[in-house]
Image (cartoon, helix red, strand yellow):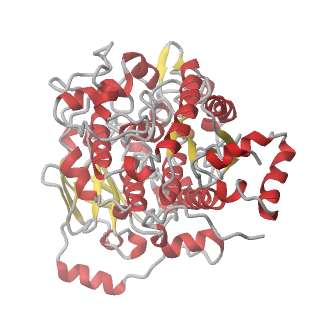
Amino acid sequence: MTDSRDKAPKNRSAEWFGLMDKDGFNHRSWMKNQGLPNHLFDGRPVIGICNTWSELTPCNAHFRILAERVKRGVYEAGGFPLEFPVMSLGETLMRPTTMMFRNLVSMDVEESIRANPLDGVILLVGCDKTTPALLMGAGSCDLPTLAISGGPMLNGRFRDQQIGSGTHVWKFDAMVKAGEMSLQDFMDAESCMSRSVGHCMTMGTASTMASMVEALGMGLPSNAAIPAADSRRNALAHMAGRRIVEMVREDLRMSKVLTRQAFENAVRTNGAIGGSTNAVIHLLAIAGRMGVEFTLEDWDRLGVEVPCLVNLMPSGEFLMEDFYYAGGLPAVLRELGEGGLLHKDALTVNGQTMWDNVAAAETWNREVIFPLAEPFKPQGGVAVLRGNLAPGGAILKPSAATPALMQHRGRAVVFEDIDDYKARVDAPDLDIDETCVMVLKNCGPKGYPGMAEVGNMALPQKILKQGITDMVRISDARMSGTAYGTVALHTAPEAAAGGPLALVQNGDMIELDVKGRRLHLDVSDSELAKRRAAWKATAPVNERGYAKLYQDHVMQADEGCDLDFLVGASGAPVPRESH
Ligand code: FES
């Protein structure tokens, strides 16, 4: 090899490509079958492009183009890009739920990075779980890392009406059930909703997590909102490719960016965007991988009083494309910073502080991005509820709930699991009215398994036909980020793990008091003890494969649902030579 390699700073990849022996020969020679010239092995930073492209993940189906743009930037800055695939998670197709596989993907990412000659990593993330999964896996390795989100789809339009991913599916479905929309019109709306590359364009989980990437400092400014189909998304990928090479030279590792300050910024940002409840679980899991002290309580303490500044579906009326044109996340971060709600000096991947990045951001449309002094909604964050029904906590998103229901006492109508719910919810003889509290059990991390997004269970048809659109609902499930309603989610411990939710019976009275942060089952302790003694676990048990590993080791929602043996960063030392 050439002298230039000897003069270069020693990168991790030099332990593979810099060896002047049989092993070095092997490492270089086989790579050269791709037409790679000698000089690429001279010690320059090797950048892994971790790609979740898949035609089974439609939200990430444009990622090969994005990866090519990253490569341009990496080459331009003197790096050596190598793209590698990891398992992809497509929200709309995978069963039982992508959430079950989030941790598996994180293991795929972690081991792919650790086992290979990489000095820095670009994470291509988009559809809901791909973002946390890749951040978790990369976090465990702690190399210089930069995330690029794939960007939201263009606004949906159906018969000259703006329609949002997910949000309008729930709305239209309820309208069909209430007899207000024909099935033909419902089918016609399909192609009008998803009309370009990109992920859900509501402020659902994907857009929330893309915003979290930016608020955490893990993405370049404007990462969250540039539409996938906008040429500026490709330019962002190009710039990210240039920047990751510099990050390797600066040794700007993930742990220098993902500090407690970064997580606090993310929680407040989630409040300001009225973000998805799923972010609660994902950020807890990412912090766990980084060894950052960060708990469910932080969500309530830091985030719930942050007003919602953006008028985006599902809580509002606009969509991500509008958000970008209005100024995007930098404009929101500036509002937070000016209101004293941002750690301005938190470091970001471009080497600048958060405030350096957003201080000059402008808002171009005040119907979309509201000022902090006159917010869109007074509360945008997540309320953490506790009580004898949720000793480990449950969460509720006030901005998606009906104000009149946030203090409510009602009779429980219990569904033992999702099959029971599906079988009985529309039965004409179901004993329920709009004052009841719908309770769904066995949909938590172990119970489903995977903690499906069924917590916003549709109301019974006979209730919908009365024109009623919301009721109090409680479960150990999650809820789609595009959904809405007065829904207490993530109840911990879950029913399948023997949490108090398992003991609720039809006719019990339940009290929800969001202001008092209380979720109470009005049943005596002695009666609950009797029910506990008679309780038997009913959740299906997987006997093999990843599902077994998952069920055996998944932690509860208040701990981020990671596998217990994956928590804590371990870095990416060079594994022992295998040849
Ligand atoms: Fe992929 Fe919504 S289905 S982001």
Say whether residue 310 is visible.
Answer: no
**Residue drawn where x is 68% and y is 30% of the image:** 65
In the displayed structure, does residue 341 sit left or right of residue 351? Answer: left
Please tell me how many numbered marks the rendered image carries.
0
In the image shown, does 41 or 289 lie closer to the viewer? 41
Quarter of the image where the C terminus is located:
bottom right
User: Above or below — where is 549 with respect to 401?
Assistant: below
Most extreme residue toward the right is: 33
As drawn, is 155 to the left or to the right of 56? left
Q: Is residue 505 visible?
A: yes
Pick the residue in front: 540 or 186: 540
Q: Residue at x 39, y 46 (%)?
A: 459
Instruction: Tell me which image quadrant ligand 1 sits in.
Output: top right
Quarter where residue 437 is shown: bottom left
Which residue is painted at 49% across and 60% down in the image?
140
Q: At which x and y percent is residue 329?
A: 36, 28
Q: Position of residue 479 (x, y in %)?
A: 42, 48
Please report the residue visible at 48 percent of the width from the left and 37 percent of the height from the top: 177
Q: Position of residue 379 (x, y in %)?
A: 21, 37
Q: Quadrant of residue 12?
A: bottom right
Tell me: 557 left or right of 232.
left
Residue 540 picture location, percent across and down: 55, 73
Image-quadrant location for residue 334: top left
As drawn, the residue found furthest toward the bottom would be 533
Vertical placement of 458 versus 384: above or below? above
Q: Is residue 238 above or below residue 574?
A: above
